[in-house]
Image (spheres, grey):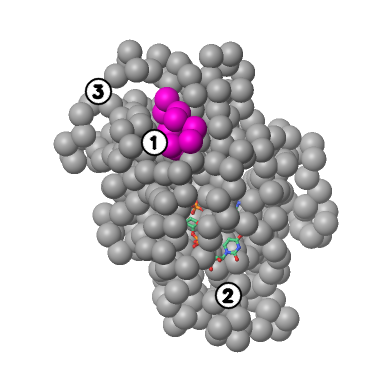
Amino acid sequence: MKILTIIGARPQFIKAAAVSRVIQSQQHLDEILVHTGQHFDANMSAVFFDELNIPEPKYNLDISGGSHGEQTGKMLIKIEEVLLKENPDLVLVYGDTNSTLAAALAAVKLHIPLAHVEAGLRSFNKKMPEEINRILTDHSSDILFTPTAAAIKNLQNEGIDNSKILNVGDVMLDATNYYGTKAEEHSSILTDLKLTPKGYILVTVHRAENTDSLTRLKSIFDSLEKLSSDHNLVIPVHPRTMKSLKAIDFSRERSKIKFISPVGYLDMMMLEKYSKTIITDSGGVQKEAYFHKVPCVTLRDETEWTELVVNGWNFLANSDNLFESFSKAQKIKFSDVDNIYGDGDAAFKIVDKLLQYPTSI
Ligand code: UD1
Ligand code: UDP
């Protein structure tokens, strides 16, 4: 069976790494990787292929930047060409980026079966570009691999047939388990940055809703700056955020916050695991905080990972109530709620299902 996997952005490299590793162990599966080029800096792309042993993409479409329509449209055109040439049995996509949507549209219009990993997540905020990408991808998909019970419910509520849905758990848990040990062995980031375990707060900010409004970005960084009077803050800066920080003339040199370039996954695992609290607007980082049992404050008005908030392990915040949420987060006690993100074998379950395709659908 010929699977064509289409990825393009940082979190997709990590998710695909977990699944591709299992695909490679299967004689009857042949995987071709297509990189759309959405993320292209070495520390946003190549580092993950190297560290996580992701096979070399057969195609790099070299499409990045531009407006949503322009980016997605250009990807759609080029992905269609690749699909016509390769004629795969199935297209595999991850998450909710523009690369995901372009791949889904190209596949569904050519009547090529489509499988979506991380299906069913909803923020119920259609102003988020990711929300549209998810909904359209889910409704184009033939196999929907969900990570959580909430995701199944969302799909059922939208009328998606149960026979298409398979709850496998979260592939990011597989990745954390597998690469977490490697991170301990190979990463020296704590020493390099002179950080003491549990002596710093890890921050990531990149979401469009926080970076595109320069006023909102400024108030977030003003609050972080205040927090840095009493705590060590470390932030690996996403290129989108770097552009916006430059636009507001934020002085990184005068700041007490430690600004660093985006880091590879192994270094990120270590930064997360040994931080005392994580402040983030990332989807992936929210869950990784939970995997490492690190309190988390999420700089958003809503989250798709509702179980984290419901169980009291994650507090939503904005720049106005960041301090209050941060204080609450210091009191978080992690109780054992079993397997809300599965058993850490999502990749095996996904590959099992693909091996049975199409007879299983
Ligand atoms: C994208 C996804 C978002 C995901 C994030 C992961 C969409 C709509 N958004 O957002 O869901 O959470 O990836 O990080 O698909 N840039 C660089 N170098 C890079 C990558 C990006 O300079 O290696 C620049 C781009 O040129 C662009 C900006 O950063 O100007 C934003 O990149 P883009 O891929 O459009 O969106 P992200 O914010 O990364
Ligand atoms: N990540 C990383 N290096 C960084 C920042 C994030 O390896 O400098 C990893 C992080 O551990 C997680 C994933 O990238 O696995 C999350 O990606 P991102 O926050 O860009 O996107 P989102 O999950 O919000 O879509």
Residue behind label 2 places its C-beta within 8 angstroms of ligand 1: yes
**Name of the residue lying farthest toward the bottom:** 249
Label 1: element kind: strand
| Mark with earlier residue (2, 1) | 1
Q: Which residue is mark 2?
A: 243
Label 3: element kind: helix
The residue lying at 20 percent from left, 29 percent from top is 161
Residue nearest the observer in this picture, 104 or 255: 104
Q: Inspect the magenta stretch and tell me whether residue 143 lies in it.
A: no
| Mark with earlier residue (2, 3) | 3
The residue lying at 26 percent from left, 54 percent from top is 124
Q: Position of residue 174 (x, y in %)?
A: 55, 31
**Gap in angstroms between the C-alphas marked 2 and 3:** 44 Å
- Marker disc for residue 187: none
Q: Which residue is mark 1?
A: 116
Q: Position of residue 104 (x, y in %)?
A: 37, 42
- Quarter that holds the C terminus: top left
**Gap in angstroms between the C-alphas marked 2 and 1:** 31 Å
Label 2: element kind: helix
Examine the rendering and report whether any part of residue 257 can be seen.
yes
Q: Amino acid at mark 2?
A: Lys
Q: Inspect the magenta stretch and tell me whether residue 90 lies in it.
A: yes
- Asked whether disc 1 touches disc 3, contact meaning CB atoms under 8 Å apart, the reply is no
Q: Amino acid at mark 1?
A: His
> Badge 1, how many Cα within 10 Å: few under 14, some, many 20+?
many
First to last magenta residue range:
83-91
- Asked whether disc 2 touches disc 3, contact meaning CB atoms under 8 Å apart, the reply is no
The residue lying at 61 percent from left, 18 percent from top is 25
Q: Which residue is mark 3?
A: 163
Q: With 244 as the anchor, is 191 left or right in this view?
A: right
| Mark with earlier residue (1, 3) | 1
